[in-house]
Structures are given as C-alpha cells and as structure tokens.
Amino acid sequence: MIWGGPENFLAMGGYAFYVWGSYLVTLGLVIAEIVLLALRKRRALARLRLRGTAAQGDR
Amino acid sequence: MSINWFKYSSPQTFFPLAGKLALGFGVLALLACGVGLYLGFFVAPTDAQQGEAYRIIFIHVPAAWMSMFLYLVLAFWAGLGLAFNTRLSGMMASAIAPTGALFTFLALWTGSLWGKPTWGTWWVWDARLTSELILLFLYFGFMALQAAIDDPRRADKAGAVLALVGVVNIPIIYFSVKWWNTLHQGASVSLTKAPTMAATMLTGMTVMAFGFWFYSIAAALMRARCIMLERERASEWVADYARGSA
C-alpha cells in the first residue's frame, strides 16, 4: 500500500483538512440529497393515502 | 416492428421504468465511485508539485463537468416541454435542477479547498470561478421561479424560458480558461488534444465522472417519480400505486 499506514493516509501529506474537507462535505451532501428524496416520496404517499381515504368517505 | 417512441412519454408508463432505471444506475454509481476512489487514493501516485492536495481532483472535476452537463440536460427537457407542451418534460427539468445545483456547489466548494493550499486563497474573481458561481445562481433562480408559481404548467413554462436563456453561460464557463487570462488552469482533458495527466490519475478521474453521472441519473429519476406522485395525484394510476405501496 503506497501510504504505509493509516495515519499517513489520514494526514494526506499535510493536506488532510483540504482533502477530507472536500470529500466529507461531498459525501454528506449526497447522503442528504438521498435522505431528502426518500422523505419526499414518503410524504407524497402519505398525502395520497389521506386523499384515498377521503375519497372513500365520499363514495 | 416499428418502435413506438412515445411509449414512455407519459408519466404513467414512465413511472415504473424510472424506478427500475434509478435502482440500476444507483448501484452502478456506487460501484463506479468505489472503484474510482480506490484508483484515486491507492493507485494514483503523489503529484510532483502538489503532493497529496491534488487528490481533490477526483471529485472537483467530475462535479464541475456534471454541473455544466446537467444544466444542458435541464435546458433540453425545458425546451422540449416548452415546444411540445408535454407534462413529463417539465417534470424532468424540475427533477434535475437540485442535483445540478448540488454539483455546482460541490465544484465551487472543492475548488475553494483546493485553491487555498495551491493558490493561497479560497476565492478569486476569476472568469472560471465567477461564471460557475453564476451557474449556481441560475440553478437557484430556476428552482425559486418554479416554486413561486402555483400552477405547475405555468411554472414549467417560466422555468423553461429562464433555463434556455441561461444556456449561454455554459460555453462561457467551459472556454473561460481559454478566452481570458485566468488563474484557474486550462483544460487538462479535452476532445481536441491528448490529456496532459498521468494515466492512473486520468483513469481514476474518468471512473469518478461516470460514477457522478450515474448518480445524477438515479437521483433525478427518483425526484421525477416524486414529482409525478405530487402533480398527478388526481389520476387513478397514482391512487392505485399509493394503495399498492401501503
């Protein structure tokens, strides 16, 4: 392994803040987007079910 | 056997297909990013000048490419929707905008974190950086404009006009490093000449670019499905789907 140990890998040649700052924010925002999408779908379905029960009440 | 090109151009027929595609591209994105990150961190060597800081390239460049590409795809769907007055086209444009804005922000964020150690500054009003920032405002403007109009069809029309006008910004971003004397470096990878990058670095970056592309397709299709459930809530197939997934 070219890093010769996890501590070197984390230190990233002294640029840890910049490299991991870039990667962690990217990972965080991508995960956030996926979570928000899942929540949006769940909310849409819940609203549809509410709409469904309301319609049955009318029939 | 003639192909019915319009088979998937209605929300109802496209909805299940979008679900399968989103899942497939999501898995592909995970694989590609896994391989890309392995190449980027464990195969690509240390850079002679920048040391390890250059490894930001494996997300900075793919994010920048996607920020421009997704805007063109957004404008394509918006233009199609404007021309043919098709509901699904407008939904696709609205589905792409947030993911495009995400990659534009990431291109600016990772670029700034790369600029600090290598240029000595987080930000400079350079032609490339400024036009990319304008792209971010265009994405926000598109989303804000659509959110401000209640009727989705009118929101699509208004958004489409803004999106199409904003297309001029994409070549400006891309060629800014050639037209002006920018601090940002010129294209290391272009269609006209051989890339000026080490092979393993280039491979890692390319694989990550495919990973981001697959991710964008998956995210946009997931959002398009949500939009369909919201906008087509009055139709029977949506009610059936909601009952089925209870």
Image (spheres, grey):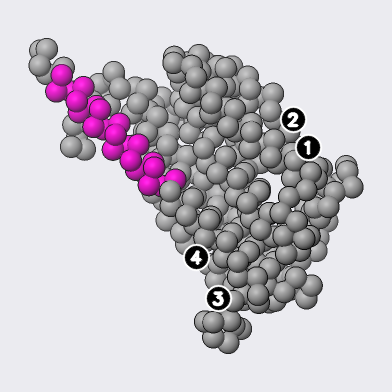
Q: Mark 4 points at which residue?
A: B34
In the image, which is nearer the foreground, mark 3 or mark 2? 3
Check disc 2 and give the amino acid type: Val
Which circle's residue, 4 or 2, is located before the other in the chain?
Answer: 4
Q: Distance between the residues labelled 3 and 2?
A: 41 Å
- For the point 62% across and 74% down, which residue is it? A12
Classify residue B243 as left or right of residue B82.
left
Instruction: Please identify the quarter of the rendering in which residue A15 is found.
Output: bottom right
Q: Where is residue A9 in the image (x, y as percent from the top left)?
A: 57, 78
Residues at marks 3 and 2 on the same chain: no
Q: How far apart are marks 1 and 4 (CA)?
A: 32 Å
Check disc 3 and give the amino acid type: Leu
Q: Mark 2 points at which residue?
A: B168
Q: Distance between the residues labelled 4 and 2?
A: 34 Å
State which chain disc 4 sits on. Answer: B
- Mark 3 closeness class: few <14, some 14–19, many ≥20 residues within 10 Å: some
Q: Distance between the residues labelled 2 and 1?
A: 7 Å
CB contact under 8 Å: marks 2 and 1: yes
Please report the bounds of the magenta region as a residue range.
A33-54
Classify residue B171 as left or right of residue A46.
right
- For the point 77% across and 60% down, which residue is it? B120
Residue B172 badge:
1
